[in-house]
Amino acid sequence: DAGITQSPRHKVTETGTPVTLRCHQTENHRYMYWYRQDPGHGLRLIHYSYGVKDTDKGEVSDGYSVSRSKTEDFLLTLESATSSQTSVYFCAILGDPGNTIYFGEGSWLTVV
Amino acid sequence: SQQGEEDPQALSIQEGENATMNCSYKTSINNLQWYRQNSGRGLVHLILIRSNEREKHSGRLRVTLDTSKKSSSLLITASRAADTASYFCATAPNTGTASKLTFGTGTRLQVTL
């Protein structure tokens, strides 16, 4: 357990509505990540952060934005949710030893 | 596109048998890692092997890395029902930040009694 908490854990929302997922960590790690997991695609990186206000795009960033105003919180926002964004979203941090990723328990999002 | 591709996609064995999963990747790497995911849970780190290493052991796990073939294998010896899970390889690039891991699509392992 690397002190990662995701919220909400489950959410059903309607197409076109905004959705924000929150990732909270308690151990002051610099790097934080948002992945999505879909059958047949494995885990794909959406966005990541390497410090407060420092973020960069991953492999599947279209339709998503992120913010990190505090070290401990990394927010993922779907500005206008679409059915293709139905997925399981995992937050992760880069911990010790170096290059080891620790994952949260996931957020199940269904867009109807 | 995925950097790592696991093979097979699914594997079913009996308790006590060995399970071998393979991972192929496309570009130069700094290290390769294996993760495990139980159903409905997040991924858990199992083992990391660096690009200058050829083999690594951790308990019942044995990982090999062949950088010339851009491939790795994960061997779980004397499998138990509790090993039932999905297993993913992940690669860290050799250039730029080594903190961006790319995951494969995973191997689903079923261990039956």
Image: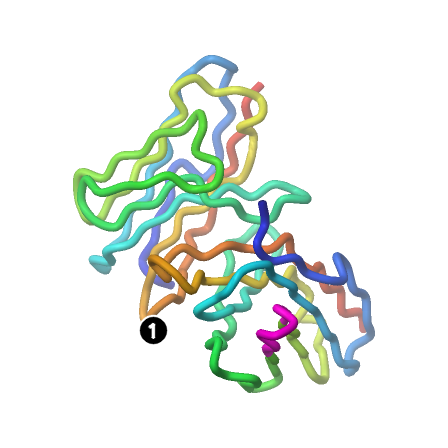
Which residue is at a point 78% across and 64% down the rendered structure image?
B11
Q: In the image shown, does A104 or A83 lie closer to the viewer? A: A83
Q: Is residue B85 left or right of residue B17?
A: left
Quarter of the rendering occupied by the N terminus of chain B: top right
Query: Element at badge 1?
Result: loop
Residue at the top extreme of this rendering: A16
Whole-percent x, y for residue A76 in the image: 36, 34
Q: Residue at x 32, y 41 (%)?
A: A56
Q: Which residue is mark 1?
A: A97
Identified at 76% across, 62% down, the residue is: B8
Residue B90's x, y, as percent?
53, 61
Question: Residue B106 placed where, x, y %?
Answer: 65, 57
Q: Is residue B21 left or right of residue A96?
A: right
- B70 in the magenta segment: yes
**Residue B30 on the magenta span:** no
**Amino acid type indicated by mark 1:** Pro
Question: How far from the left and from the top, in percent, is residue A99?
Answer: 38, 66
Tell me what residue is drawn at x 70 percent, y 77 percent: B80
Which quadrant would residue B6 be assigned to in this image? bottom right
Could you tell whether B100 is left or right of B68 in the image? left
Q: Establish if B14 lies above or below B60.
A: above
Q: Quadrant of the C terminus of chain B?
A: bottom right
Colouring of the image? rainbow
Bounds of the magenta segment = B65-71
User: In the image shown, does A60 or B78 lie closer to the viewer?
Assistant: A60
User: Would you identify the image quadrant in which residue B36 lies?
Assistant: bottom right
